[in-house]
Amino acid sequence: MTCIVSQSWTTTLHRRSSHPINVHRRSSHTATFSSTLAPRDLHFKKCDSNYATRNAIYKARNQEESDLLLLDQQTEIKNYIKEIKLIFNLMDDGMITPSAYDTAWVALIKDVNKPSNGPQFPSCLDWIINHQLHDGSWGEPLMFSAHDRLMNTLACVVVLTSWNVHPEKCQKGMEFVNENIIKLKDEDDEHMMIGFEIVFPVLIQLARKLEIKVSADASILSEIYAKRDLKLAKIPKDILHKVPTSLLYSLEGMEDLEWEKLLQLRCENGSFFFSPAATAYAFMQTKDEKCLEYLTNLVVKFNGGVPHTYPVDMFEHIWIVDRLQRLGIARYFKSEIKDCVDYIYRYWDEQGIGFGRETNVPDVDDTAMGFRVLRTNGYQISSDVFRHFEKDGHFAGFPGQTSEAVTGMFNLYRASQLLFPGETILEDAKCFSRNFLTKKRSTNELLDKWIIAKDLPGEVGYALDVPWYASLPRLEARYYLEQYGGDDDVWIGKTLYRMGNVNNNKYLHMAKLDYNHCQAIHQSEYIQFQKWYANLNIEKSLNTRLLCSYYEAAATIFDPERCNERVAWAKPTMLLNIITSLFVGSTFSNDDKQAFVDEFMSTQHHHGNEKPWCAVMDALRETLNQISSETLATHGVDIQSHLHSAWTTWLLSWQKEADVTLGEGELIVRTIDMSSGRCLTMELSSHPLRHRFFYVINDLYHETSHKGNHAIGVEIDSKMRELVQIVFGYSPDNLDPDLKQTFLTVAKAFYSKGHFDAETINGHINKVLFERVI
């Protein structure tokens, strides 16, 4: 297979419907390697035949058109890279849209020197005057939520009435409120604004004091008041005054507060839980200078229209990294992501983190996401951080609470899959969050209190049905490209808001371009792979895993420039399959096996064409020579002798062992590593971790080869945990991180092969390699 990185192909495909994520377990047969194909191999033979037929209708464009298309794609991708790098360069404390509700509370503050002169922050009042929507409301303009529009609008009408300005805007605003308040009954509780039940009743009281008529159905208000009483009862007032809790976010909705005690619970920046509205209310009650300083800085920074919370720097830094990784384009921004991860680690707290640095009220969502980003980047942090969110086996969004959100549990589940051996808190978190999400999915209740996303059920479904151990990079990206909403995703706080650096169409458009670009190259490579195999003139019954072998390589090592590593994965995998299948049974004797090994080790070619295995020997030598020459040309490293030595070691072991799969996992890793130009597996021979690495890899390959779908059990999961610890845990021997990643990626491919049934893998292959992203 010739490495092709500059040719673009178009394909005519028979479109299938999207393959469901749900996993179907296979029957309990044991995979065998003989001239008689196992049922699973027969399935893959049929799959390869189907794809061969499909590939037969592929037609390359005119070379000139192909080159122009490739050039256009590369130019577009480069432009997006520049734009996204600029986003990283301009990152501050978070890009977030204004909140009319919070701006209204800040606008209520009177001039601290001469209250009769007007507002302390006239720019806030101006912002409100200039941002009324055409229907008379204030709030998120592109997505209607009755909770959002009513809270924003009533707050703005209260402010304008208080300052006795723009009565026509007040009239239009109240017409909207009175016409739409009935719609609160129709909205899902999960999409109610955070703290709505606490602060909306206070807005109604303020409105009535100003003789603003609110025509609300008594049943609607009584339901809101009941929710308020229930929420306030969960955190007694004595606790509220002693310990920072999430109720600090809604202080403006509470009465009879002991401010001397509460002022001790401010954040470092002078705010109450980073909330402008709560902090504005606190200032009106206390005249505290730190509160005023926080608000003044915020008004200046946002030119009058303040957000519902600030800063959101931790949230932004974490989620940008996560989005780019899941979209499959993180490799373009390695240095920027490194800076982000360093920033997250700088403000990491073993008590947990929140959406802003130095928060005094951590949440499980940000903590889980931060933990996941830090652990996958090799930072040494303790899983004990999650003990602060657990009580009696129950995990909650905030310490001491009993409620949880879908995304909080979703991200806790994703974090828990990175557990090391002995991390019981993560075992408990994984069990709890998985059960929670499974139940929510079964009852079709995957609505979230923090975000209105394009396809949250799809994201949760992927996480539940594709364990992280089995989630190959290109498979995850292919699904997430359909789930990520870009600019359209809206977050829920006290009001609806958007995070432009987290949900961004630039990421989505670039990721689609990149995916289709890589996919075209992979399709071209697979055509060459088929030709290579056809030229071997091997018995057709051995054509059992051609497509699957290439898929494992391309779904894991997908970068266009890493063609040689894909070759070093796919071709040797097929050759191992051919060699071990060829010599099973009575067709060949032990003498034939010995002759095959001797021929490989010999510096002279003796077999001519008289031996029945000569085509396999030629293919093996040609493949290893191709890998060696490509590595020399690309990296300037001569690996030929090392590569030959690695295969000699395996062949000698294979010749003696009854189990043909022993050592194959190690050989594949060595071959891939050497093809990258690193040759680090040679250095690993004397490393203390060598035995642990290869023990896990070989066992995983052995189990999945012998047991098929029954390979994945407690023992294999235990070995994967051990491997995850080796890869991401502390290593005093400074083992190269690239080599660690090679072990992990190959292990995940083996795990995936053993976890899913053939039909599911077929669907994954179709989606990853042949369904173009639109």
Image: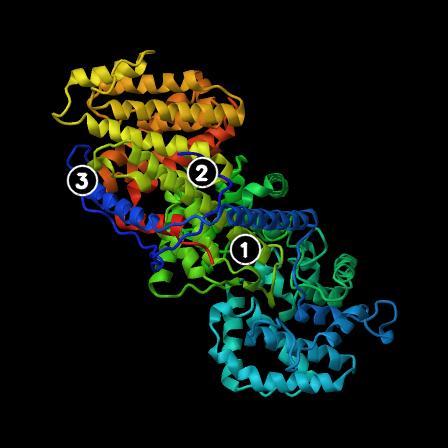
Q: Is residue 749 visible?
A: no
Marks 3 and 1: in contact by CB < 8 Å? no
Of residue 366 and residue 248, the one placed in the foreground of this image is 366
Q: The residue under label 3 is which amino acid type?
A: Ala
Q: The residue under label 2 is which amino acid type?
A: Ile
In space, the residues marked 1 and 2 are separated at their CA atoms by: 21 Å
Q: Give the x, y percent position of residue 604.
A: 32, 11
Q: At x 59% / y 39%, what residue is drawn? A: 334
Residue under label 2: 557
For the residue labelled by badge 1, is the local secondary structure a helix, a strand or a loop?
helix
Is tag 1's residue or tag 3's residue first in the polypeptide sequence? 3
Of residue 465 and residue 494, the one placed in the foreground of this image is 465
Q: Is residue 771 visible?
A: yes
In space, the residues marked 3 and 2 are separated at their CA atoms by: 28 Å
For the residue labelled by badge 3, is the local secondary structure a helix, a strand or a loop?
loop
Q: Give the x, y percent position of residue 130.
A: 74, 75
Q: The residue under label 1 is which amino acid type?
A: Leu
Residue 422, by quadrant, is top left
Of residue 634 and residue 38, the one placed in the foreground of this image is 634
Q: Give the x, y percent position of residue 108.
A: 75, 72
Marks 2 and 3: in contact by CB < 8 Å? no
Residue under label 1: 508
Q: Give the x, y percent position of residue 119.
A: 81, 72
Residue under label 3: 38
Q: Is residue 549 above or below residue 146?
A: above
Left or right: 592, with 197 as reference point: left
In space, the residues marked 1 and 3 are separated at their CA atoms by: 42 Å
Q: Is residue 654 above or below residue 493?
A: above
For the residue labelled by badge 2, is the local secondary structure a helix, a strand or a loop?
loop
Left or right: 733, with 504 as reference point: left
Is tag 1's residue or tag 2's residue first in the polypeptide sequence? 1
Left or right: 696, with 254 as reference point: left
